[in-house]
Image (cartoon, rainbow, N blue to C red):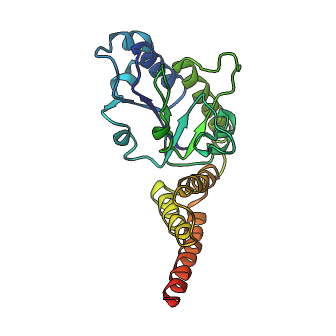
Amino acid sequence: MCEVIVVLVEPEHPGNVGATARLIKNFMGKLVIVNPKFTSLDEAYARAKHGRDVLENARIVGSLEEALSNVDCVVATTAKLGDQYHVFRTAITPQVFAESLKNVRGRVAILFGRESIGLTNEELKLADIVVTIPTSSTYPTLNLSHAVAIILYELFKNMQASSRRIKFRTAGRVEREQALKFFREIIQMLGYKPEKIPLVEKAFRNIISRAWISGREIHTLLGVLRKIRDQLTSQRQAQR
């Protein structure tokens, strides 16, 4: 079973932080708070109820980079959807996310944005997977703690159902980043226009992240990508 880390990015209302701690106590996870926009946790403790210990053990950090320094996968949540031309906001539902995660091991950080504006585009670019909760188009934005509740419930339900299944080691973040590095070198040597490279890279990242490929699979993929890169390098050198 994976380790779930709920990351609240610059929360603006302490009550939502307390409610999140209570939800983590109900279901699962650890809490990380990034640069909170309030000075007192009194209201948060009042809302946490029996989740007080979750709040007491929460990490409070100054930047998102610090919060993600030791995780294997980053999942971002958003109410603003992309389309086929905006791959940075291409999202899956909590149910699909939970189903894909149930046989995974590792540290998975789930990012929840500010109550007012959510996560920025730059923060979304840090994610391996983007998740959205289907809602009415007339009012698509959920309260922060309600969004946390829905996603943690889906995860808890699926992980309970899969507790007896065979587990495998999933590819780590370092391995996936190495695959992305090889892929980037390949598309650069193929002559892709610089402005298109970030979109192609993100599409590749989406594929390998959503698939939750195993350690053995990433090892095989790295070997193939390395061989392609080396072959292209040799051909370019021979042409000089």
Q: Quadrant of the N terminus?
A: top right
Q: How many numbered callouts? A: 0
Q: Nearer the viewer, residue 11 or 57?
A: 11
- Whether residue 134 can be seen here: yes
| Vertical comparison of 225 with 71: above or below | below
Q: Is 120 drawn above or below residue 184 in the view shown? A: above
Q: In the image, is residue 146 above or below residue 95? A: above
Query: Residue 46: x percent and y percent?
Result: 39, 9
Task: Say which residue appears at 49% left-offset and 24% top-offset.
Answer: 117
* Above-or-below relation of 207 to 42: below
Q: Nearer the viewer, residue 53 or 238?
A: 238
Closer to the camera in the image, 157 or 62: 62
- Image quarter for residue 88? top right
- Rendering coords of residue 67 (x, y %): 37, 39
Residue 32 image offset from top left, x and y in percent:
39, 31
- Name the spot of residue 82 as percent of width and height, x first: 64, 37
Residue at 43% x, 16% y: name it.
Answer: 18
Quarter holding residue 36: top left
Can the viewer see residue 170 in this picture?
A: no
